[in-house]
Image (cartoon, rainbow, N blue to C red):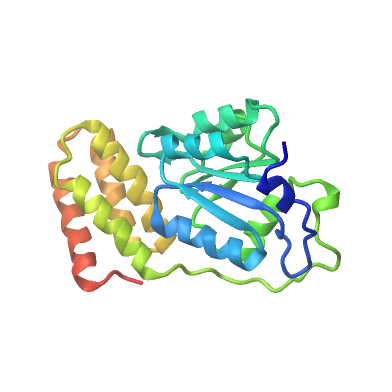
Amino acid sequence: METLDDLLFTRAPTARRPLLGLTVLVVEDSRFASEAVRLMCLRSGARIRRADSLSNARRHLAIYRPTVLLVDVGLPDGSGLSLIRTATDAAPRIKVVLGMSGEDHSAQVLAAGADGFIAKPVQSLMAFQSAILAHLPVDRQPPSPRATHDETIRPDPIAYRDDLNHIAQVLDDPNDDGALDYVTQFLGGVAKSAQDHDLDAAVTHLATLRRAGRNPDAGVIALSQLVQTRLAAGGPL
């Protein structure tokens, strides 16, 4: 039986809206990063849905099949690699499956079966479009010549504050190594996406302390203070 997403896929792309007719499911816990993807889909003609965890993504996929699946590698309830494996093994297969991360996990993403890898921060509209179009069949390519104007996408700073508020709550009670793993993974990606170099350095310092087997308390305190300073000041953007 055809779904709404199958019917929308019949809409032909145009030079200015090369992803017209596609439905994108982005699995991303960062509001800032997912807002960047939302804006890029809006500019490109694609419809978008978001899941902020593996469990929510699986609920989405049990109901409908997107044409494009974008999966962040680090998620609050596990690795996005497991979802990539499940999605690429399923029949019928989602047409385009891409992994995303602020770190170079390209080898792991491709080994899990994904069609490609997108490095965060995702800012170039043309690069985003090209990453998806590269894996679509010829009949889904936009007509030539394709519009060549690029655009740098900058999400609303409110989304960045949402991410900082979220991680501030986690930092209030970082009671196990799993919580600190999540803090460094999540906040490292957010800091890179927002180009917040001081925050990125604080995350790196905490990660370095932990890798060296040293007491991470000083790093946690410094990171917490910086997050609170960002929230009080309205963020660095």
Q: Report the front residue among 157 and 106.
A: 157
6 vs 195: above or below: above
Residue 38: x %, y % from top left? 53, 60
Q: Residue at x 38, y 55 (%)?
A: 190
Q: Is residue 3 shown left or right of residue 188?
A: right
- Give the residue at the far front of this rendering: 1
| Quadrant hosting residue 229 | bottom left
Residue 196: x %, y % from top left? 35, 63
Q: Residue at x 56, y 33 (%)?
A: 84
Residue 53: x %, y % from top left? 41, 40
Q: Is residue 37 shown left or right of residue 1?
A: left
| Quadrant hosting residue 179 | top left
Q: Residue at x 19, y 47 (%)?
A: 171
226 vs 82: above or below: below
The quadrant of the picture occupied by the N terminus is top right
Can residue 44 be seen here?
A: yes
How many marks the image carries: the answer is 0
Can residue 124 be seen here?
A: no
Residue 15: x %, y % from top left? 78, 68
The quadrant of the picture occupied by the C terminus is bottom left
